[in-house]
Image (spheres, rainbow, N blue to C red):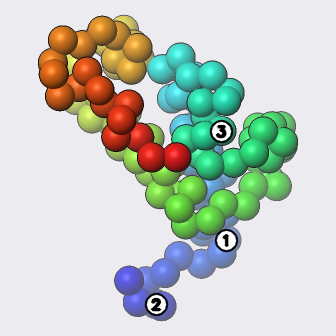
Amino acid sequence: MTAAQAPKAADKKRMAQVGFKAAVNIMEGWGCTGADMQRILRMPRSTFQKYKANPDTISMDDDQLERLSYIANIHSSLRIIFDNQENVQGFMSMENKNALLRRADAFIYY
């Protein structure tokens, strides 16, 4: 990405605000705990609570913004794969007999 293509600070802040709110809603739907969300988003509890209470204070680095993107893309993929909301939201906690997916948690990097 060239300097001309790089998002401006104001754009990054807006992406963080919108993305954080969407990611929290998605992860809550998946049944993630606050601690799960904090690990996935790589932020301490106090920062997570501060951003939930007042999104105007949000400031995220590129890695955290990328994590928001992953969450949105996973959710979008689940909506394409499954016809019903129960599977879209419940997929993360549903038993899966597929050998590859049985250990999907091993692929999550914190």
Circle nearer the viewer, 3 or 2: 3
Residue 50 spot, x, y in % from top left: 84, 43
Q: Earlier in the sequence, mark 3 or mark 2?
A: 2
Please indicate, yes or no, whether residue 47 appears anywhere in the rendered image.
yes
Label 1 close to label 3 by CB (< 8 Å): no
Q: Of the residues shown, which amino acid type is indicated by label 1?
A: Ala
Q: Which residue is mark 2?
A: 4
Q: Pointer 3: what residue? A: 38
Q: Position of residue 104 (x, y in %)?
A: 31, 30
Rendered-image quadrant of the N terminus: bottom left
Q: Which residue is mark 1?
A: 10
> Which residue is more in the foreground, 25 or 33?
33
Label 1 neighbour load within 10 Å: few <14, some 14-19, many 20+: few
Q: Observer-nearest residue: 63 or 23?
A: 63
Indicate the secondary structure of the residue bearing disc 1.
Answer: helix
Q: Residue at x 82, y 55 (%)?
A: 57
